[in-house]
Image (cartoon, rainbow, N blue to C red):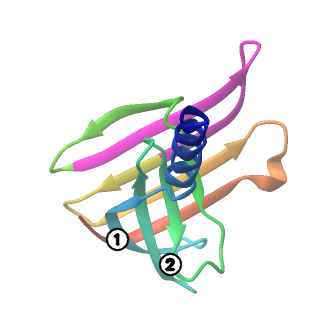
Amino acid sequence: MLKNILILTTAMLSLVSTAQAVEQVVVACRGSAFADMTGSETYHITLSDNGDLAVRPVSKTSSGVLLSSETQQVLQNDGEALNIISARKRMGMVLARQTIEVDYRTGKGKAIDVQMMDVVKNKTIYLDWCNR
């Protein structure tokens, strides 16, 4: 009986800990869907505890870009720039490609989400005033 209680308690704690994913803000920027930065709002590039990267608006009124830890490839991550790409593939075909590019010297960057099969869902978030 005690063994069953311990197993149940451990299972419940593991479910609670996975449900409360912690995200760390890596970069804060102003961002917009328009290159001239009209309608800009604050965006955060966050790193979750399982390794996923996301570019999300703070106000939650716009959509963001998510890069899964399983498919992302870090091209550059140093004091000069952040450049990460991700591609979802199925049976050898690329279904979606996400990119985060930030140049810390200029403070500018882009987050791009391209859906190969549905062009309507493609989005680009232009970033400016990026700070680590």
Residue 23: where, in percent of width, then height?
A: 42, 59
Residue 84: where, in percent of width, then height?
A: 41, 40
Residue 97: where, in percent of width, then height?
A: 62, 37
On whether residue 93 falls in the magenta region, the answer is yes
Q: Residue at x 59, y 48 (%)?
A: 12
Q: Amino acid at mark 2?
A: Val
Disc 2 to disc 1, C-alpha distance: 10 Å
Q: Does residue 61 appear left or right of residue 45 in this picture? A: right
Q: Residue at x 51, y 49 (%)?
A: 13
- Tell me where the magenta segment starts and ends, as one range: 81-99
Q: Earlier in the sequence, mark 2 or mark 1?
A: 1
Which type of secondary structure does the marked residue at label 1 adopt? strand
Which type of secondary structure does the marked residue at label 2 adopt? loop
Toward the left, the furthest residue is 79
Toward the top, the furthest residue is 92
Q: Residues within 10 Å of mark 2 (few under 14, many from 20)?
A: few
Q: Which residue is label 1 attached to? A: 28
The label on residue 58 is: 2
Q: Residues within 10 Å of mark 1 (few under 14, many from 20)?
A: many
Is the residue 39 above or below the residue 95 in the image?
Answer: below
Task: Kindly check if marks 2 and 1 are in contact, taking CB atoms under 8 A apart as contact.
Answer: no
Is the residue 51 above or below the residue 41 in the image?
Answer: above
Residue 20: where, in percent of width, then height?
A: 51, 59
- State which quarter of the image contains the N terminus: top right
- Name the magenta segment's main secondary structure: strand
Give 115 or 47, whichever is nearer the viewer.
47
